[in-house]
Image (spheres, grey):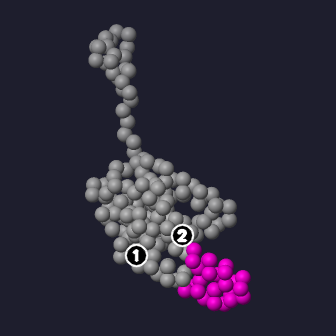
Amino acid sequence: MQQVTDTQVIDSQDIDQRYAPPTATVGDIAPQAPGVGRLAGRLARLAAVIIDSLLFLPAGIVVGIMDSSGGSTIAVLFAVLWFVAIAALQIYMLVTRSQTVGKRAMKVRIVRADGSRITFGRIFGLRYLVPALISAIPIVGSIFGLVDSLFIFRQDRRCIHDLIADSIVVEAD
């Protein structure tokens, strides 16, 4: 910045620039890589999580009904088989399409922040397992879950689990 002394004369262009808004480069938000696609909407991501959660609901309903009628062994067996089947389906879809059932229904998918295909190890290990382990810590886990969810309101729509895995959720083709 230029210092002005008593003897210097400021030309009219410099005077006009004094009232101009400051210019700055925002360094904390990386520009979106070309070819990445449009970021998925917040409501689409929420709907995808709700759909994925509802897939596990039949197992809970059967356990609740069967347990009250005395068939708890059959109910638990059904619940375990249902859980394994849904988990296997979700894993298969994550490996082959980078989508869960809910994300496919909402036409969104997970990619690396640079737009490249994301590996299953990164999705499962960093995007799901690490946050699940943090969430299992008493008190800290509850706070983490809330803060992780609230990060969706950032401009880049990346939650903490997205930042950990270096991923983004974009609209699918």
- Residue type for callout 2: Ser
N-terminal label among 1 and 2: 2
Give x and y (percent) for residue 6. 38, 10
Q: Residue at x 59, y 60 (%)?
A: 145
**Cβ–Cβ under 8 Å for marks 1 and 2:** no
Give x and y (percent) for residue 27. 40, 45
- Residue type for callout 1: Met
Q: Callout 1: 10 Å neighbours few (<14), some, many (20+)?
A: some
Give x and y (percent) for residue 62. 62, 81
**Residue matched to label 1:** 93
116 sits to left or right of 147: left
The secondary element bearing badge 1 is classed as helix
Q: Residue at x 34, y 9 (%)?
A: 7
- Read off the magenta span: 57-81
**Residue matched to label 2:** 53
Figure check: 128 above or below 17: below
What secondary structure do most residues of the magenta stretch adopt? helix
